[in-house]
Amino acid sequence: MTRNPNLPIGLETAGPVRVAVMTDDPLLRTGLHSLLARTRSEDGVSIVDLRDAEVALLDAGVDGTRGLSRIASLGVPVVVVIGDAGHLGAAMTAGARGVVLRDQVGPGIAAALAAVRSGLTVIDTALASTLVPPKAPAARTTFRKGGIGDLTDRERQVVTLLAEGLSNKLIADRLGISDHTAKFHVNGVMAKLAASTRTEAVVEAVRRGLVTL
């Protein structure tokens, strides 16, 4: 998982996590409400309306895309429930700060919601590895050991911030550099990781061990 270092530590445990459960599936809604109700006393979870929420738990729908268009308008960090591992990329691209498989939702969801409230991005390691198929051994041999040598120290900082979902402007602000320089480093990271999108760059960085989610 990755953490937003600018988040005041004191906010990480500031009372129960206020969660809005968003799904059109009545069975899933009942199941999530029941699960979260059982974890309230132990992990500090409170189910509220969206206007009062700190985190939204959003069902992506059977097709994996139905609910994703709503993420940007919700105004709070979103943990997305997907039915298939193949929908992970779409959820990340849409701005999800957490992704869980529908059939893997369990008591640990409360900890995931708390982590997302604290500025973390939560994705199961096994789930993340399914986003991009492993490359052939011959291709992997072209990388230096661990893949770390392919990026400069600054580029490793940039890819870590990309994993947090930051824009070029926010990366520039975080590192104290110009927007132009941030864009230059982002393009450099994508080129070295053979990625055509920012999401692919993050996934490749995870695969090489440059970023831990």
Image (cartoon, rainbow, N blue to C red):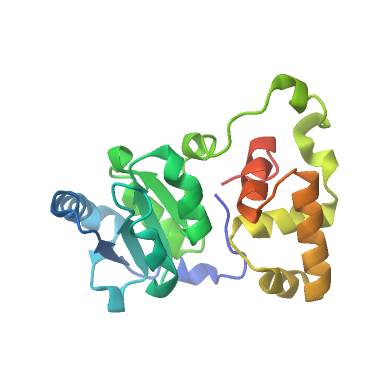
In the displayed structure, 162 sits above or below 35; it is: below
Is any atom of residue 121 visible in this view? no
Residue at the (82%, 57%) spot, across then down? 154
Report how many numbered discs are placed on residues in the image: 0
15 horizontally vs 143: left or right: left
The image shows residue 37 at horizontal and vertical percentages of 18, 55
State the residue lying farthest toward the top. Answer: 137
Which residue is pictured at 76% across the width and 26% down the height? 139
Q: Quadrant of residue 129?
A: top right
Front in this rendered view, residue 35 or 87: 87
Q: Position of residue 104 (x, y in %)?
A: 32, 38
Q: Which x, y percent locates residue 62?
A: 29, 47
Can residue 180 be seen in this snapshot?
yes
**Residue drawn at point x = 62 percent, y = 29 percent:** 134
Front residue of 45/25: it is 25
Q: Position of residue 156 (x, y in %)?
A: 76, 52
Q: In the shown orientation, is residue 150 left or right of residue 99?
A: right
